[in-house]
Image: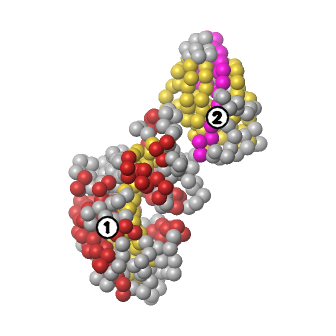
Amino acid sequence: MLPHRLLGLLGLLVLCEGQDETRTEETCDNFTDLDLSHCFMGTSLYVRLLLYTRSNLECGREINHHHPSSQPLFDLHRPTAFVIHGYRPTGAPPIWINHVVHLLAQQEDMNIIVVDWNRGAANFNYFTAVSYTREAAHNLTGFIKTMQEEGASLSSIHLIGVSLGAHLAGFVGANLKGKIGRITGLDPAGPMFTSATPEDRLDPSDAMFVDVLHTDMNSFGLRGAHGHVDFYANGGADQPGCPKTIFAGKSYFVCDHQRSVFLFLCSLNQTCQLTGYPCSSYGRFLDGQCLQCEAFKPASCPVLGHNMSQWRDALVRLGQTKVFFSTTSSLPYRKLIYRVDMVTWNQYLRWGVVYIRLHSGRNSTEARIDHRHLRLEQYTSSRLLAQFDEDLQHIQKISMRISTGNIIGPRYKIRLLRIRFTPLEHPDRPLMCRFDLIMEENMEVAFRPLACDSGL
């Protein structure tokens, strides 16, 4: 069955806003822009390939499918990235196309080809769009084979597929016997693919390296692991800042799913580094049990983005690796992460939620560790993962509160023999410690962090 969000989206006819299919400049070829009538009547498949390079970032040039070298801007000896969109129920061009073209061009000198299959993807009937993915993949496969015949290397080709486009990319890779250099799947589509065999969806055998980002597994996205490495943002399902009710309109249906594109765009920007931690589940990651990356030494944990060369061999060797990370609700999405190790020595067993606040001058940021209740007992070591929305560098004060839910009776004391804060992604920053701290449950206590002994 289709998820309720997809069914609801197909009913939002007011969202279909298109423009006349015209060129803004005589020499430019623009992405196909369709209107409401196309959404109702459906469209037959027609694939266009729009080339962008550093020489023509603002002006796409359509490439002849059978004679790619006839386009003078197309250098077959450069790396080539294909950007493949997904289902387009409104018929309008994706809002992110220009952004991804510009950001990819910043990474290296490459050919960037936008695969425009809007005629085919623009249908209120999702099943029709799904059926066109095989035909579109056959079309694109033929073009890449022609590229190869004219001197291009399959290993230098990178397919970036969004939603339904991720499976389309997988079909192209399978047609070429997995010899494509890389496929990146951004929240591969779930409806109609949930029970599909590897041959009928994106899977690791489709390219020499396959990386996947999940953001909406409980609705439009596909559950499970489907690449050499699968990144799960906030567990791979509900994303922070996305609406939880249908009253938010279009955003309720598409926000979580589209977040995969925005996280990928952010990762292409050098100021936005999203590190994934290998783990069996998001819950174990939040428990602080999966913060080591020995398998990737001398490199650190895998970072989402275009350049994954330092992790690629290890990830292919390991097979299928799941990595998890958390984000904020808006740019730059990155959280400040500390590993918190503490030893308790309280007389009575207590269960509670931990709040930690960092202070730097007048600024402060708080982490609430509430995905489960922490067990606090006599002489017990505990490890927590504290994630903060703001990156404060010079920490002058730390305050903590342990909320046990006790509202009647005496407040029990909780004694922390030692507590250590380790900045996970900033090795240049000092470790912070505190020794023999007495707290009362449900009461905040503030302290200045101390330097840690090497033996702690």
Q: Dot 1 corresponds to which residue?
A: 122
Q: Residue at x 40, y 38 (%)?
A: 280
Q: Where is residue 347 in the image (x, y as percent from the top left)?
A: 61, 11
Lower position in the chain sequence, tag 1 or tag 2 = 1
Q: Tell me, yes or no, if residue 303 can be seen here.
A: yes
Quadrant location, the C terminus:
top right
Residue 352 lies in magenta, yes or no? no
Q: Where is residue 122 in the image (x, y as percent from the top left)?
A: 31, 67
Q: Position of residue 142 (x, y in %)?
A: 26, 74
Q: Nearer the viewer, residue 182 or 386?
A: 182
Quarter of the image where one finds residue 405: top right
- Viewed as shown, does residue 272 lie left or right of 49? right
Return the residue nearer the eye: 330 or 226: 226
With respect to residue 169, does 245 lie above or below?
Answer: above
Task: Name the side, left or right, on which 286 lies relative to 32.
Answer: right
Is residue 190 positioned above or below 180 on the image? above
Residue count near mark 1 (Cα–Cα under 10 Å), binned few <14, some 14–19, many ≥20: many
Q: What kind of residue is marked 1?
A: Ala
Which stretch appears magenta? 401-425
Q: Which residue is at 55% across, 25% downward?
A: 382
Number of residues whose C-alpha sits closer than 10 Å to that of mark 2, classed few (under 14), some (14–19) or many (20 or more): many
The residue wearing badge 2 is 421
Please say whether residue 420 is one of the residues in the magenta stretch: yes
Please tell me which residue is depicted at 41% across the width and 38% down the height of the picture.
281
Residue 132 seen: no
Image point 29% across, 72% down: which residue?
140
- Above or below residue 259? Residue 171 is below
* Distance between the alpha carbons at the discs numbered 1 and 2: 51 Å
- Please name whichever residue, 300 or 281, is drawn nearer the observer in this view of the structure: 300
Q: What residue type is labelled 2?
A: Phe
Rendering coords of residue 423 (x, y %) = 62, 41
Q: What element carries label 2?
A: strand
